[in-house]
Amino acid sequence: MKLKMGFLLFLCLNFRVWGQEKGVLNKDVLSKDGQAVLAGQAGRSGLVKGKPITGAVPRIGEPVPDVLVTGIRGLQLGGKVIGGTLGDFSGGASGSGGSLRLSAFRGKLLIIDFWATWCSPCRAMVPVLDSLQKVFGDKVVFLPVTYQSAAEAGPVLASLRRLRPFDLPEVLGDKVLHGLFPHRSLPHFVWIDGSGILRAITEEKEVTGENIRRLLAEGSVVRDGVVGLGRTEGSVPVAASGVGAGLALKRDSSVAYDAGKALLLDGNGGDGSRVLYHSLLSGYKAGLASGISVSAFDPVLGQRFTARNVPFPWLCRLAFGENGRRFPVSRTMILSRDALGMNSSLSGQAFEGWLDAGHGWCYELALPASLAGSAYGMMQADLLRLFPQYRVSVERRELPCLALVRTGDADRLRSAGGEVSVDIGPYKAVLHNAHLSQLMMRLERQYLQGSALPLTDATGYTGRVDLSLEAPLYDVPALNKALAAYGLALREQRGTVEVLVVRDAQ
């Protein structure tokens, strides 16, 4: 069975932005290696590739090493076009394209935009950067950089250009810049001035016309006074006074964590090779990528269920997630006097601070193979034992729903057979000889996860389907236009759904 699930495997939150997809609150973006990353750092999580270059990572205020950047496409510099035509991915290889050393950008403000296709805030910044590039002309160069290959990034870039054309260059399959500027979360912006000095490392909200104009005019953007020599702002090393002090520096701290090993023992749990069973609960751990992961069952090693830096409702979703049950916000009811301490609309570092203020938890249950079948019951028992002030249950309730329905009797869905494949991304969904549940799962877990109404499949269609949708999957009206060709529609109607209910014990 060929499932082209791309970068998504389970539940992923985003630590820095609750909205990974346009117009929704992101809590379920899935990572490429099977981990889930908590909203608030997700687009944005600790899944960014690139190993630091030993001894070569520059500090703010220091010259940036003159490394050779490869994989460049469509860069206009000095009257020349480096790396061929924008949008031409015929080369295929991740390292194809032109090459330049960073010194080629001297005399211009260079703003490097580290991004990835799975990062919705990154995609949302594309038209912003394009507009700023047109405003500042040859004084500034915006350089989008991704570790992903042309085969991975090309289709998403092509979709973005169809929605709104832009003229930004591309650096694909990068390893050098990711090694020079290692980071845990996205978006990640690096500011290098015309003399090759590293001025700042920021989040996307600092990339504004006002900040760019002030840096071009003053050489630094000072708002909060002088940054002392050799100090560190969070995890951002600062070398010189006044450098980058006005920009909110990105504190992209990280701690070593291997999802294949036990959690929080000896920095990570040692190698985890001798752990047969443990149940562990701790408060928020700064620097640890947030999210939920469930390891594959192993007849020798057993199975592990892990939650890292998540609010209490997420512990409940993990514990009651047997048989593939999903409980996004629309299927979760918090009937507790502590409701304000279980959810937050904050984002970025403010959200991390909220978690650290007693609202974030780390939990792990590791079981031998002989007990893996009892995992969910044991996690539910842990919740009752560790949080006796609450009662958690799954109930069937009749609620307003966003239901997938058939609009006619004609069967336009029946599969012609053949190989099973599922290829779903932000702007398309292609199912061949697959079930509608594959589409519904991705809509509920990611693209429509912020819907106030629970999603349900009311088609009654149990057979395999062939279906090809070209539409932004986060936009219900646009999605309905594409679904109409198959006699389908998403409509509001009442239905009976399973709901996760959290209430006070007394």
Image: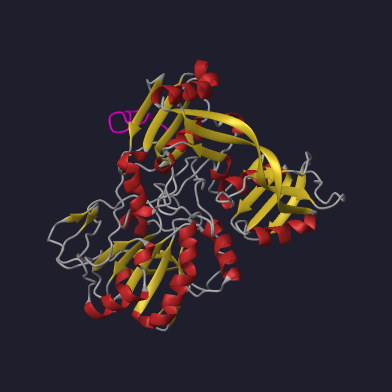
Image coordinates of residue 219 in percent, x first then y, are 22, 76
Image coordinates of residue 402 in percent, x first then y, are 67, 49
Q: Which residue occupies the foreground of this view, 418 or 200?
A: 200
Q: Residue furthest front?
A: 506
The color scheme shown is secondary structure
| Residue drawn at x 44%, y 59% as measured from the top left | 115
Relative to 25, 485 lies left or right: right
- Numbered circles on residues, count: 0
Q: Does 416 appear above or below 21?
A: above
Q: Residue furthest top?
A: 370
- Asked whether residue 268 is drawn in magenta, I would say yes
Image coordinates of residue 504 in percent, x first then y, are 46, 30
Query: Start and end of the magenta stretch?
Result: 260-271
Relative to 139, 373 lies left or right: right
Image coordinates of residue 202 in percent, x first then y, are 32, 62
| Residue drawn at x 28%, y 62% as measured from the top left | 248
User: Image quadrant for the C terminus?
Assistant: top left
- Is the stretch drawn in magenta largely helix, strand or loop? loop
User: Image quadrant for the N terminus?
Assistant: top right
Q: Which residue occupies the foreground of this view, 24 or 42?
A: 24
- Asked whether residue 301 is drawn in magenta, I would say no
